[in-house]
Amino acid sequence: MALAQAKRAATEARLEGLSLPASGAWLAQARGAALARLSEMGLPGRRDEYWRWTDPTTLAAAEAPAAALFDDGGERPAFDKIDRVTLVFVDGVFDAAASDDPAAAEVEITRLAEAGAQDIHWAKDLYGALEARGQAPVARPFAALNTAIATDGVLIRATGKAAKPVSLVYRHASETSDAILHHCVKLEEGAELTLLESGPGAARFSTVLEVEVGDGAAFHHIRTQGRDHERRVAAHLFARLGAESRFKTFTLTANGVLTRNETVVELTGDDSVAHIAGAAMGDGGFHHDDTVFITHDAERCESRQVFKKVLMNGAEGIFQGKILVKPGAQKTDGYQISQSLLLDERSQFLAKPELEIYADDVQCSHGSTSGAIDETALYYLRSRGVPERAAQALLVQAFLAQTIEEIEDEALSEDIRTRLEAWLARRLG
Amino acid sequence: MLEIKNLHVKLEEEDKVILKGVNLTVETGKVHAIMGPNGSGKSTLSYVLSGRDGYEVTDGSAVMDGEELLEMEPEERAAAGLFLAFQYPVEIPGVGNMTFLRTAVNAQRKARGEEEMSAGEFLKFVREKAKALKIDAEMLKRPVNVGFSGGEKKRNEILQMAVLEPKMCILDETDSGLDVDAMKLVADGVNALRSEGRSFLVITHYQRLLDHIVPDVVHIMADGRIVKTGGPELALEVEKNGYADLLAEVM
């Protein structure tokens, strides 16, 4: 189908003046293919079904809208008590001096910017491959754009259990920065890796993370997206799961004028498990969109989506989550819950849960709720002497607790819980 | 001491008057019981005293040890020493019972300018109180009242009372939904807290609770007023003859 004229014009405007980063043969080929995919689908507009509730204009614009730098008031950095290997990107540019020696993680780590010239055979099969698979049935044009023009990122391959978590730290230093990073993670059979991501990244930040989880492998992903109020982010996570593998991802978002987190997971090996969780807290000019697509294409797999948002002073939350159970994916166990807690009447939550099932022996459930703080619980707490704001904060924490329970590692869940409590103390303390 | 004078209360949302001039004085260290038929305003009185939203006080006062309760926020009333054991204890998913108790105790201590208790100190303190009420460690870990049986919920209310050490305790139909054994356990918990400096207002529909928590004074409430006051024998009279005769006599 030919692209609408307006869409073609917008896509051409975005690409005008951009050139594909210089890369070696295999990477140049992957970039070219992504560019072709993008040209075919075009950048999204408000009339696209999955962009009706989130305006893509500022993500698609040729120039990134400026975002003021944020003073976090000396809050300690995310994951700072975790023994990890830190790799720092400032406005999307790798900062070697601020980073640890990648070798300490005891996994293969190569920067994308340096990988093009090398013959990294595993990356050739992964870079852009899961993104391309994830383009149907729902187009994800910003991911294709990312694959085509990403300037850097990391390629990680683990053959055993990583010695330490790999922690990608994204700093925002320029008010007009526009960063595009693309990461690939390949976990060979039985391998295990925890990947941490933290920070706003840039004024406008695009990330794609492609994760191939081999048979019996385990991938844990914990992300905090930075508190800069004016930053914009489009983050994509594509994963493919082998037999008996485990995949767990959790994202904490506090503040940010625009966040679009897309997660696309394919369970292709029997008995695999995927948990996707997110806690978002927004005050005022905050628009947060979780768009999830889970495909069950094997037997006895489990998927679980747990998304909760706390919204106040006109903040907006979006959830679009789909579970697709393909023919033959028997004994599928799919669960999805999306909930919002609206602290005032100006805030808004829109949810679109979808189930599409082509197997007859499956168990799938979904639920979505939106509501205010439970006044009876608030009164009960106050009648025991807890002041109103502290009681509210306690109830908000309780509301979000289910998402944090999805983080297996106790030190990491404690880190997230502390950040959440600090945010609440600032708002409701 | 709690002194309620000429208390008039209506529902905020509708023009329905519930309390029509309640006069009641509970002296320090005494146990008073309020009995009355359904709809007489007993529970409303307990809610209004603890500061629940939805009620409008149109006249009267409720003074506890010289402080006007009706002008205070619910948490201020609690810090001043008022405690309401709920007829229907509220479930709070996601908040651990222990966290709840410690938050409450420390909030009250802070409000009174006292030092907060450390986690270790508090744990020891609560465990002792819990043991007497047959509340095990598992129940302390679970979210507040979630999945608790009726008896467990009521015991949990008494545990909160024991831990918060209030001056004035209001028990709103604490016997409802309890079997005899559970009621005895709850009553024992309450009796253990009876002391010279602590007063109780026990609201109940039936006399049976008063066999276990023996009151000093019994009031009969009907149609938003205290209509008769007497000793424990008044409760027995109600038990024997029901409310109808008694109300016909006084109204």
Image (spheres, grey):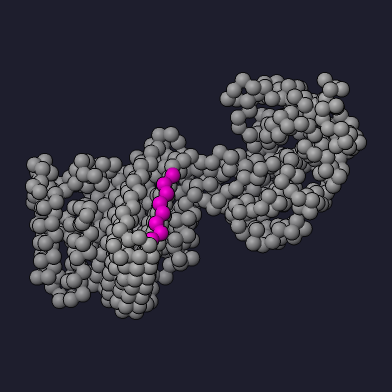
A69 on left or right of B18: left
Q: How many marks?
A: 0
Position above or below: B39 against B163: above
Q: Classify residue A148 by image quadrant.
A: bottom left
Image position of B8 (left or right of B220): left
Rendering quarter of residue A406: bottom left
The magenta segment is A362-369
Q: On the picture, is B11 further left or further right than A164?
A: right
In the rendered image of this protein, does residue A28 appear above or below residue B79?
Answer: below
Give percent across and percent down for residue B175. 75, 44
Task: Tell me the chief SS of the magenta region.
Answer: strand
Q: Where is residue A304 in the image (x, y as percent from the top left)?
A: 40, 59
Q: Residue at x 10, y 57 (%)?
A: A36
Residue A207 position in % (x across, y down): 25, 58
Can you give x and y, in whole percent of width and height, for residue A300 in the image?
38, 68
Q: Which residue is drawn at 32% across and 56% down?
A: A357
Residue A252 visible in this rendered orientation of the protein: no
Residue A366, magenta (yes or no):
yes
**Taking A342 as reference, is A200 above or below it?**
below
Q: Which residue is drawn at 29% across and 62% down?
A: A327
Nearest the viewer among A70 and A290 is A290
Residue, x 86% and y 29% (percent of image)?
B229
**Per the image, is A147 magenta?**
no
Q: Which of B75 and A365 is in front in this view?
A: A365
Instruction: Name the foreground residue: A105 vs A371.
Output: A371
Task: Name the foreground residue: B74 vs A133.
Answer: A133
- Can residue B184 be seen by looking at this rendering? yes
